[in-house]
């Protein structure tokens, strides 16, 4: 398994809008195209207006299939463009578990 951590800085005052579109449209369509959200957090202390998502893929090939499917899906492209209207910036990291991780 590999994990993609996406830290998203939401525009001030737009968190409720971001979460509504994420929950109602973005997440179901992401799952439909083959990726799974294993966790989501928002900050209470530190950088405010930040949401961190942890997505899981079987391997790099699985992640690549999702990336290819999302750009071919007009619905997903439209939803992504709408969601981006609430985002200041996003950073991502691709991670693999160590032998000590309970998440394999």
Image (spheres, rainbow, N blue to C red):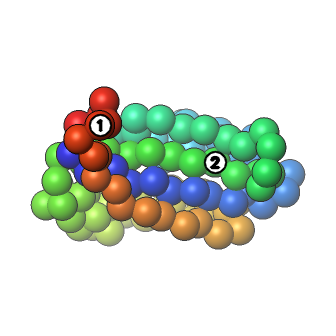
Q: In which quarter of the image is residue 29?
A: top left
Q: In which quarter of the image is residue 22?
A: top right
Whether pointer 1 and pointer 2 mark residues with C-beta atoms closer than 8 Å, the reply is: no
Q: In this view, does 94 lie to the left or right of 26?
A: left
Relative to 23, say whether 48 is above or below. Answer: below
Residue closest to the far top: 102
Nearest the camera: 94 or 21?
94
Nearest the camera: 91 or 11?
91
Whether residue 14 is visible to the viewer of this picture, yes or no, is no
Question: Comparing marks 1 and 2, which lies closer to the viewer?
Answer: 1
Under tag 1, what secondary structure?
loop
Q: Residue 73 carries which label?
A: none
Percent from the top left, x then y, of residue 31? 33, 40
Q: Which residue is drawn at 84% across and 57% down?
A: 12
Q: Is residue 36 left or right of residue 90?
A: left
Count numbered badges in the picture: 2
Nearest the camera: 45 or 84?
45
Whether residue 94 is visible to the viewer of this picture, yes or no, is yes
Percent from the top left, x then y, of residue 11? 78, 60
Percent from the top left, x then y, of residue 4? 38, 54
Q: Residue at x 57, y 57 (%)?
A: 7
Relative to 42, say whether 88 is above or below. Answer: below
Q: Residue at x 36, y 61 (%)?
A: 94
Q: How crowded is mark 1: few (under 14 residues within 10 Å), some or many (20 or more)?
A: few
Q: Which of marks 1 and 2 is nearer the N terminus?
A: 2
Q: Where is the N terminus found, in terms of image quarters?
A: top left
Under tag 2, what secondary structure?
strand
Nearest the camera: 19 or 72?
19
Give the residue at mark 1.
Answer: 100
Q: Residue 51 carries which label?
A: 2
Q: Residue at x 27, y 46 (%)?
A: 98
């Amino acid at each position: 398994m590999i994990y993609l951590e996406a830290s998203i800085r939401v525009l001030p005052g737009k968190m409720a809008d971001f979460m509504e579109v994420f929950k109602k449209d973005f997440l179901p369509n992401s799952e439909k195209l083959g990726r799974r959200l294993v966790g989501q957090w928002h900050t209470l202390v530190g950088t405010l207006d930040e949401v961190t998502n942890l997505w899981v893929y079987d391997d790099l090939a699985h992640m690549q299939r999702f990336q290819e499917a999302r750009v071919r899906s007009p619905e997903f492209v439209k939803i992504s463009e709408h969601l981006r209207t609430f985002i200041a910036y996003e950073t991502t990291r691709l991670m693999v578990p160590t032998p000590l991780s309970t998440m394999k």
